[in-house]
Every structure is written in structure tokens, then in C-alpha cells.
Image: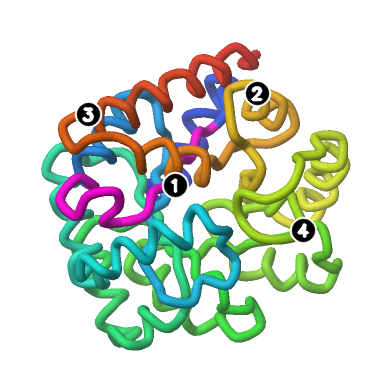
């Protein structure tokens, strides 16, 4: 059982929902990411999504685009992202880490090399936004052989056919994009999410996390009522962008602790 699967199994047994924060590697400070990750895990994050900076992040809104641009200017590439995971693992050996990003950095690094180095660093899952499921069976198999999960996005526009494809090869969890558009945009319609999640679950047998549009404890709690996990990114990235270096990890922990309390208030 992967570390992600074990985490969700334990949460489900306890009647709790997973909290999955997203931060961009190398932002807002090149050396702060492992400290931020540790603080978030200590505050109640169940899985951490770590964004790999890329120059053309088509699915990301302005907040995460700008975070990626800042990180790239600091020279943050795949090797440094994996080094951050290794540093995090020196302090935490149980909280799953998912690398989230785009095909270009993975392929430039080398797919086989990436899988091996990610497994060695302590990565637990990979979400490549622009890898369609119909082209990922070999990639998914190679990841599974090294104990890594391949996670996919589903959207309000996803067809039954796409969900069947995702169900065939996805592991860990699936990430339902609750809005049409880019990260951080639009108004979250929790009623629409409540309708879509059961439809997804009729196809997939892994947990369903929901992200995009979740900005605070109230929206997180509403989404937790109808899903297995809450993913929160733009609001957190935006908050950390204004913090000084010596306060950024503390700020991340306090933000996550507030969301964690809201989610636990929904626990059965």
C-alpha cells in the first residue's frame, strides 16, 4: 500500500477528510520550501502538493503563475525540487508528497531518471497536468513499480469516457477541478460539486479530492461535506507571498491549522 493510500485509509477509518495544501517549490523564498512543508504537516496537512515551476503553466491562474515565475528566476528546477523533498524527509517520513506540474520539466529531466530520483527523494505521487490518461499507461506502470501513484485531474466537462480512462490507471486519489478555468478563478458552486463527486465515484475507486476556488475555512468545510479531500492552493500561495522569510513557515502553519479545524468540525 502506498503512503497516499495508507493516509486515506487511516483518515476514512477515523471519519476525517484529507487536507491537501499546494505550494510552489522555491516560492516565496528559494530556501524556505522544506520549512513550509514541515510547518504545514505539523499543522495538520495530510498530503502536500508541491508545484514544479514551469514557464507556461496553462492551468494556473495569476497567483500560481507569478509564484512559478519568481521560483524560476531563482533557478528552481527539477533537481532543486527533489532536493527540497529530500530535506523535508529528514524531518517527516510519513506525510505524502505529490509533485504537481507539467510534462516539459519531467521530460527535460528524463522520464526514467525522474521516476527513479523522485522515488529515492521520497515523493509519493505525480500529477502531470498535460498528460492525458490515454497516453499514460506505461508511465503509470513505471511509477507503480517504484511505489509512486499517478494522479489525474477531472473537471466539470469530463466525459464518462475520460472518467473510465482515468479510473483504469489512476491511483492515490483523483483531483476534481471544481471550476471551469484556471486555478484561483471564479466562484465555487458547492451544489454543483455535490452533484459531480458521486458521478466521479461511480467510475473511480480511489478517493476524490476537490480543488480550485477554495479560499478559506468556510469553503473548505463546505467541500469537505461532499468529498474525501480538500485541495487549497492559490489562497495559500497568495498569503505566503507577503510574508517575511523568518515568518513564512509560521504563517503557513497557522493558515493550515485554521483549515484543519474547519475540516475536523465535519468529521463524523
In the displayed structure, would residue 114 be above or below residue 252? below
Q: Earlier in the sequence, mark 3 or mark 2?
A: 2
In the displayed structure, would residue 245 be above or below residue 258? below
How much space separates mark 3 and mark 2, taking CA atoms?
26 Å
Q: Earlier in the sequence, mark 4 or mark 2?
A: 4
Q: Earlier in the sequence, mark 3 or mark 1?
A: 1
What secondary structure is marked by label 2?
Answer: helix
Q: Residues within 10 Å of mark 4 (few under 14, many from 20)?
A: few
Disc 1: which residue: 22
Proximity of marks 4 and 2: CB atoms separated by less than 8 Å: no
Q: Earlier in the sequence, mark 3 or mark 4?
A: 4
Q: Which residue is nearer to you in this view: 167 or 95?
A: 95
Q: Residue 163 at x, y = what percent?
A: 76, 65
Residue at the image position 25 percent from the left and 72 percent from the top: 77
How much space separates mark 4 and mark 2, taking CA atoms?
21 Å
Is residue 221 in view from this perspective?
yes
Q: Nearer the viewer, mark 4 or mark 2?
A: 4
Q: Which residue is nearer to you in this view: 129 or 146?
A: 129
User: Looking at the rendering, in which quadrant would you find the C terminus?
Assistant: top right
Residue at the image position 72 percent from the left and 73 percent from the top: 165
Disc 4: which residue: 180
Residue at the image position 39 percent from the left and 25 percent from the top: 44
How much space separates mark 3 and mark 4, taking CA atoms?
34 Å
Q: Where are the magenta residues, as a range?
A: 18-33
Disc 3: which residue: 247
Amino acid at each position: 500500500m502506498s503512503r497516499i493510500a495508507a493516509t486515506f485509509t487511516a483518515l476514512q477509518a477515523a471519519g476525517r477528510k484529507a487536507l491537501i495544501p499546494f505550494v510552489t517549490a522555491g516560492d516565496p523564498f528559494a530556501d524556505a520550501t522544506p520549512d513550509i512543508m514541515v510547518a504545514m504537516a505539523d499543522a495538520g496537512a495530510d498530503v502536500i502538493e508541491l508545484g514544479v515551476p514551469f514557464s507556461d503553466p496553462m492551468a494556473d491562474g495569476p497567483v500560481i503563475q507569478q509564484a512559478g515565475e519568481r521560483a524560476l528566476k531563482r533557478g528552481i528546477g527539477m533537481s532543486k525540487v527533489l532536493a527540497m523533498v529530500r530535506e523535508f524527509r529528514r524531518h517527516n517520513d510519513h506525510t505524502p508528497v505529490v509533485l504537481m506540474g507539467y510534462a516539459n520539466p519531467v521530460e527535460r529531466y528524463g522520464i526514467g531518471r525522474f521516476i527513479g530520483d523522485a522515488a529515492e527523494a521520497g515523493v509519493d505521487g505525480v500529477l502531470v497536468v498535460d498528460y492525458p490518461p490515454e497516453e499514460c499507461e506505461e508511465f503509470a506502470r513505471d511509477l507503480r513499480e517504484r511505489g509512486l501513484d499517478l494522479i489525474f485531474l477531472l473537471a466539470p466537462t469530463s466525459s464518462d469516457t475520460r472518467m473510465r480512462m482515468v479510473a483504469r490507471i489512476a491511483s492515490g486519489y483523483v483531483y476534481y477541478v471544481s471550476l471551469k478555468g484556471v486555478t484561483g478563478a471564479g466562484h465555487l458552486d458547492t451544489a454543483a460539486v455535490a452533484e459531480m463527486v458521486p458521478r466521479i465515484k461511480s467510475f473511480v475507486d480511489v478517493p476524490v479530492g476537490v480543488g480550485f476556488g477554495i479560499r478559506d475555512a468556510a469553503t473548505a468545510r463546505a467541500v469537505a461535506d461532499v468529498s474525501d479531500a480538500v485541495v487549497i492552493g492559490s489562497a495559500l500561495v497568495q498569503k505566503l507571498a507577503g510574508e517575511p522569510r523568518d515568518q513564512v513557515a509560521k504563517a503557513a502553519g497557522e493558515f493550515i491549522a485554521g483549515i484543519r479545524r474547519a475540516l475536523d468540525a465535519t468529521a463524523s
